[in-house]
Each structure stands twice: as C-alpha cells, then as structure tokens.
Image (tube, rainbow, N blue to C red):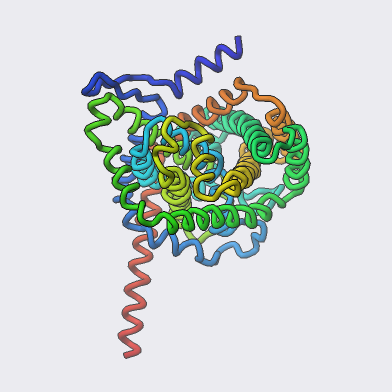
Amino acid sequence: MIIKLIETVYQFLWGDLIHIPLPGGGSLGISLLILLLFPAGIVFTIKTRFLPIRLFPDMVKVLTASNKKDKGEKSSLSSLQTLIVSTATRVGMGNLTGVVAAVSAGGAGAVFWMWVTALLGSSTAFIEATLAQLHKEKDPLYGGYRGGPAYYIHHFMEEKQGKKKKHTLIAVLFAISGLICWCGISQVVSNSVAESFNNAFHIPTIYTTIILVIIAAVIVLRKNATVKVLDIVVPIMAVVYFLITIFVIVTNITSIPAVFARIFKEAFGLRQVAAGGFGAVLMNGVKRGLFSNEAGSGSAPCAAAAADCECPAQMGLVQALGVFIDTIVICSCTAMLMLLAPQSMTDGLTGMNLLQTAMNYHLGSFGVIFIAVILWMFSFSTFLGILFYARSNVAYLFGDNWASQTAYKVLALVMLFIGGIQTYTFVWDLGDVGIGLMTIFNIFILYAMSGQAIKELKDYEADKKKNIEERAFSLQEDE
C-alpha cells in the first residue's frame, strides 16, 4: 500500500503531466516539476534583470569578501565555505550519471539546454539563498548560524497568520521531505560507489561499503568535522576533474569546433524536430540541468544560511555562482569527455558504459579507474553535504538537542550501509519523491517572498554604486 502510494506520487511529480504535439509525430512531455521550476527561473531572471550575466564579476568578487559583522561568531562559515558545502551536493553523481543519461536520451543537443537551464537556475538560487540569509537564526548546538526554507517558510506563515507559532504545517512538511530525500540519497551514494569499485577493481561491494560507512561515521559523528573535510575534498575533486578534462580537450583540440557544432545543431536541428525527437533533446537537457544544480529545491539554502557575510545579497550571488560551477563547468566537462570520443565508438551505448568507453578511448585503462575514483569522491562529498543540510531541518522539527541530531546521522549511516549491499528501488523513488515535494513547498514560497530578495539586491547595487562614487571622489581630491 505504502509502496504503491510512493510510486503514484513519484509519477505525479516526475512523470509527464502534459504532452505537447510536435511536427513529425513526436510530443513534448512536461512534468509537474518542470512546470514549476523552469517558469520560476524565467520570472526570477527577469526580476533580477538577468543577474547571472549582469553581475557575474560580483559573484566571483564576493567569495573573497571579508566578514565584517559578528566577528565573535567563530563557528559561522565564510562565503567560500558555504559555496564548498553546497557545491559538494550539487557536484555529485548527477554530474556524471545525470549528464550521461541526458546525452544518451537526448543527444548532444541536450547539453545546450542544460546550459540554458543553469543560467535560469542561477537566478532562482539567488532568491532562495538571499532569503535563507535574511531569516537565519543562531545555532546553539554547532555554533554560528542555521536556517533554510523551513525557517523562511515558518516566518512567512507566522506573518500571514499574525501570531507566533512553534511550527507551521508547510515548514514541517518541507523539513520532513528533506530528511526523507537525504536518507534516500544516502543509499544511492553507497550503491554507486560500491558498484563502480567492483567494476574497476573487482572489490566485493560489502568490503567497499563497510570501509565507506566507517570513514563516514568517523567524520559525521564529530561535531564540526564535516565542513573541514569538505574544504579539502571538494576543491581537489573539482580541480582534478577539470584538469583531466582540459588535458583531453587539448589533446583533441582539432575536434572542438565539430563538438560545439554538433551541440548547437542537435539543440535546434530540423532533423530532431522532423524525427519527433526534439522533445527528448529539450526535456532531457532541462531535467538534468534543473536537478543537477538543485536550484529551487531548497537544499543549498541550508548551507547559505550558515554563512556570516556583510549583506544577504552577497550570499545569493555566491549560490548563483555555485549553479554556474555545477552545470556550466562540471557538467560540461562530462559532456566534453563523451562527445570528444569518436561517435562511431559511442553510438548505441548508454549510461556509465558510454562514459567509461569514452574515457578508455582518451586515457586507456587509467580512464576507467579515474572515473571510479572521481565518482567515489563526488558521491562521498554528496553524503557529507546532505548531512550538513539535515542539521537545520532536524533542529526545526525536534528542537536543539544532540539526541535527535545524532539519531538522524545514525539513520543516514544505516541507509548508507544498506544501499551498498542491496539496491532498493523503493527507497530511491522515495528520495526522488522527497526532493520533488521539497521543490513544491519551496517554490511557491519563493514567488511570495521574492520581493524581499529583490529589495536586498537593489540595496546591494545601491551600496556598490555609492562606494564607486566615493572612491572616484576621493581620487579626484588626491589629484
């Protein structure tokens, strides 16, 4: 009965809700979540006056901005640390398996639509991260700050109802959905790692799983070890993956124009429209882009709230940059690794077999081993990141106590162990249902509260303009 209910909800959220006929006999299937997230990205991009393009230099600049307020909050995170934590979960298995699935199902043209989605998702990420900063609270257990959608939803509902409340229904539902989602992801993480190591090194999955759980337990059961580990792991994995891709691009530099021509040709190509395959190209790119960068799902704001920065809009810009890093940079790396391999060699291949074949072509057996190791790093950092997110939701639901925090960590470790030795499709579906419900509860509140984030953006730009004018005036005086 419960399994049937979960499958029904899964289909409602992720299945094709409507079908738009296309020339050539095909159709464009659109899911409920696409209907929610894609228009939201367009609306917020317009509201922020094309922020991802207009303020890209500011996104990079705020990473190095010093924290001038609340210097006494030693446990609060810097802008760079919150980017690392959110990147840990964004730059996960989706950047490998998700991109492979998009190209397998939608062809090279799907990559273009992933890029478009990233630009739109950056604006959504700005809105939710700025709101998280505006509504953050002191964290008495871990120190510093905590927050996220559960908190800004709670404050919004309190304001609408005109009275203080311990919990509000929508905030509770969001928090529960997040915890369900992250438990499901724990299983996906261990299963992917165990299988990849079995394929690359022929190590039995039980051994890989036990080692993975022990390492994870040592890190997550310590008070603040998670962020310290991610500070090391995430930059290493992202830089190494990027450098390997650059090496492959340089050694295949003459093929680059043809790859980009293929991406754009298949993104808009008449062949795809005539064959009824344009829907697959468009929707696979959009789906993988939306759920790789997680913009709108409400996950990353849990990290954004933990930062100590000069103004809320700065954190919004940092998280907007995170979407860019995830989809434009890392996902594009995966796409290039596949598309630079001869098409005759990869035609007909799907899934990780496609990526491994491409890497074997580029780097021989080292390429296959490299993908296994990088998948381990991506997956493990995802697990650490989601447990950091879970802190805020657990605290909102059960209050500030170590018992509930530790209980959820133990539950996640148990799920990590189970996922490594057995694939439970039901729990995977449960994770997808969790993130789908999170998105629904979050996205409608983003529409309602976006005005607060836009105001912060205007204040940020006004301050920046004022500072520029003051510096110019000072220079004139010196002359």
Q: Determine the residue positioned at 31% across, 24% down.
A: 28
Front-most of residues 1 and 394: 1
- Left or right of 92? Residue 44 is left
Front-most of residues 175 and 415: 415
Front-most of residues 51 and 285: 285
- Left or right of 451? Residue 5 is right
Q: How many numbered marks are there?
A: 0
- Left or right of 6? Residue 408 is right
Pick the quarter of the image with the C terminus. bottom left
Location of residue 67 by image quarter: bottom right
Picture coordinates of residue 345, whole percent (x, y) = 44, 38
42 to 179, vertically: above or below: below
Q: Determine the residue positioned at 33% across, 49% down.
A: 48
Picture coordinates of residue 396, whole percent (x, y) = 63, 37
Picture coordinates of residue 188, whole percent (x, y) = 62, 32
Pick the quarter of the image with the N terminus. top right
Residue 453 appears anywhere in the view: yes
Q: Determine the residue positioned at 35% across, 82% down.
A: 474
9 to 451, vertically: above or below: above
Location of residue 339 by image quarter: top left
Q: Determine the residue positioned at 52% across, 31% down.
A: 435
